[in-house]
Amino acid sequence: MSTSKETVLSFTKEELSKLVKPSFRAKQIYNWIYVQYADSFEAMKNLPKQMREELEEKYVLNPLQIVKKEQSSDGTIKYLFEMQDGKTMETVLLRMKQDELDEDGKLIHHAKYTVCVSTQVGCKVGCTFCLTAKGGFTRDLSAGEIVAQVLSVKKDNEIASNRRLNIVYMGMGEPLDNLNALAKAIEIFKEDDGLCISGKRQTVSTSGLSSKIDKLGEMDLGVHIAISLHAVDDELRSELIPMNKAHNINSIIEAVKRFPIDTRKRVMFEYLVIKDKNDSIADAKKLVKLLSDIKAKVNLIYFNPYEGSEYGRPSREDMVNFQEYLVKHGLLCTIRDSKGIDISAACGQLKEKTILNEEKS
Ligand code: SAH
Ligand code: SF4
């Protein structure tokens, strides 16, 4: 892509209505983009010709190009997108359930979709178990680049615009390290006349920047948070997530307690289970204690090994034992099934094309 104009996907409806007059045009443009999946400003037929030309001159509609698309045997699709500056990042479409048909072929239930979006190219946090971290940090994504991932995936799969889907900020990058763009993308996703994805359908996963958890909470966007906890004592957590030295476990727990959540909901704690590192019953016991006065649920994740990774994947038996201990002691706990593992689309397996190429050569 040769141009490097700003994308219209970076604008909330209010911002857009200040740029195009009269303001009802913003609503029309939103509809063309997010509901009718228009390919160009030219196609927005109910806008005056001059306005279409001006938009064309100043803005780009979608800043992403699909460079690669891989489909897993379980229906997961991983996209490699190229941005206007040539940098690349990945997005994953997870099909949580397939379409369900009755005997006559009539649809009973629609497939359920979740889009796993990236917020940065690379990541600064540098977790020792994460493949994204290996490539270092390149740059933050803009709000438009975050929004464009969901729009592009919906459009490419011809998912009807009125079909609700969920967003998890669990792709490349630490979302809270790019808080302004994240908050803006959340708002744009929520817009009616647009994608209409409410806050409760959006989950921000963080490695635990506690001061930023507070800031996100103060913004009161109605989103869920998921905490990548992974360890119950600061020593091990600092080894796995170096940033833990500045934002320790206690500071995270306190920030979670202050976070505004729907009282019917629970905060998700992700716990990456690494063989012989954090998978003992003693760890499970500490976890129960740590979360004792929080309305929490725990999601156990198998460590997904990759070439050159220094940790091992736990056995199914160890996982189940860990889970059973938590459940027996009153903690809600699920084991995440790793979707898209055959195409490296599972947690922590996302990386940039540049790293891929280096590895191949
Ligand atoms: N930076 C954010 C969100 C992206 S990572 C965060 O860390 O929460 C999404 C999830 O994948 C996190 O819970 C992360 O800890 C996990 N993850 C990273 N590397 C992994 C690996 N090799 N195997 C399994 N999960 C991994
Ligand atoms: Fe960054 Fe999350 Fe990977 Fe840690 S696990 S390096 S925070 S993307």
Image (cartoon, rainbow, N blue to C red):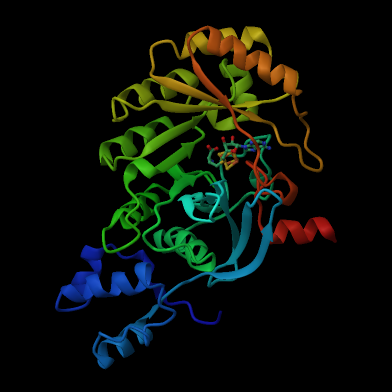
Residue in view at x 32 percent, y 37 percent:
215
The residue located at (25%, 70%) in the rendering is 16
* Residue 10 position by quadrant: bottom left
Q: Answer with left or right where residue 306 lies relative to residue 18.
A: right
Task: Examine the rendering and report whether any part of residue 179 can be seen.
Answer: yes
Q: Position of residue 44 (x, y in %)?
A: 33, 83
Q: Quadrant of the N terminus?
A: bottom right
Residue at position x 53%, y 44% in the image: 170
Residue 96, horizontal then vertical, whole percent: 55, 44
Measured as percent of width and height from the top left, residue 324 is found at 61, 13
Left or right relative to 152: residue 21? left
* Rendered position, 46 above or below 234: below
| Ligand number 2: quarter of image | top right
Give the side of residue 356 with respect to residue 291, left or right: right
269 relative to 7 in the view: left or right: right
Q: Quadrant of residue 32?
A: bottom left
Q: Could you say where residue 63 lies in the image, as x and y percent from the top left?
A: 48, 71
Above or below residue 107? Residue 233 is above
User: Which residue is depicted at the point 41% across and 27% down?
Assistant: 267
Residue farthest along the bottom direction in this orientation:
49
**On screen, 19 above or below 47?**
above
Residue 171 visible in rendering? no
